[in-house]
Image: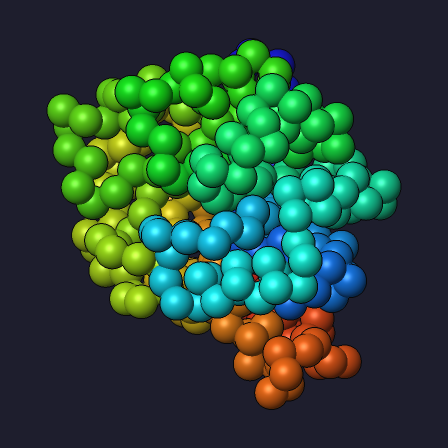
Amino acid sequence: MNHKTRLAERFASCRGNRRAAFVTFLTAGDPDLETATEILKGLPAAGADVIELGMPFSDPMADGPAIQASSQRALKAGQTMAKTLDMVRTFRQGDDETPIILMGYYNPIYRYPVDRFLTDAVEVGVDGLIVVDIPPEADDELCLPALKKGLNFIRLATPTTDDKRLPAVLANTSGFVYYVSITGITGTVAPDVSNVAAHVSRIKRATDLPVAVGFGVKTPEQARAIGAISDGVVVGSALVNALANTLGSDGAANERTASQVLDLVGNLSAALRTG
């Protein structure tokens, strides 16, 4: 992918401002389509540089309890892949610059099915995909077709991705490399900054792509520390928890739901902008 993409432009812009990009994750349709769309539209003004939008799935095996629950809420509220794509279409009516990545699992894409999903994703303005359960050995399934359509395909590297495995992980990766800062599921353990720094340096010796770090970042202090050693900081579970903490006993959103999430985005983003 040699043409300039939204992701390439955004990471270059953040680098020019001498700071890491702030990457936010929220699940599409959580807790309902209207509230999720309101939050999505508000993310750039709150400080999100890149948006990861989770594709709800009934068995999100790599995710911790918070994001698993968000998927369940979204599915219960009637979220579908078509509605997720339509959220991106609606977002693009007011924002043609902020990159949006769809993140999740292969099953919902396979069922869509793949060719139509890729065509529709490009048409509504999706920039890239993170699909956590497709290894490099299965690139023919989705990665290579996505790249041919002009979508970035972002791969995850983990603390167990050694130098022997790393070239396979990087081979068809584009947009950025997502470094998972902990072993295990999302949102459960805080990252060890010195350990993360060593792995980020090792990955950057093997690729010119930006390296963003996620899993476990919850506070402005953590965001600032991770931002100092990487090209991007990804926050998901903390935002999903902020949303969940506003919901009523019936799981319904209220007037605080969107503002609570967007206020936290603002606080975390400010930590990357103030040094």
Q: Nearer the viewer, residue 181 or 206?
A: 181
The percent coordinates of residue 222 (x first, y second) are 38, 65
Please name the residue shown 26% across and 47% down the image.
Answer: 197
- The residue positioned 85% from the left and 41% from the top of the image is 93
Residue 52 located left or right of residue 95: left
Q: Count every numbered label the image shows and give the total.
A: 0
- Judge from the rendering whether residue 89 lies leftward or rightward of residue 2; answer left or right: right
* The residue positioned farthest toward the right in the image shown: 93
Tell me residue 229's x, y (percent): 34, 48
- x 39%, y 39%: residue: 132
Q: Quadrant of the N terminus?
A: top right
Along the viewing direction, whichever of 274 and 104 lies nearer the viewer: 104
Q: How does the figure colour the protein chain or chains? A: rainbow
Q: Is residue 88 left or right of residue 12?
A: right
Q: Is 146 situated above or below 20?
A: above
Q: Is residue 143 left or right of residue 40?
A: left
Q: Position of residue 61 (x, y in %)?
A: 35, 52
Q: Is residue 71 in sight in this rendering? A: yes
Observer-nearest of 87 and 61: 61
In the rendered image, the residue lying farthest to the bottom is 249
User: Measured from the top left, where is residue 33 in percent x and y?
Assistant: 73, 59
Q: Residue at x 47, y 54 (%)?
A: 58
- In front here: 76 or 44? 76
- The answer to whether one can see residue 198 in this image is no
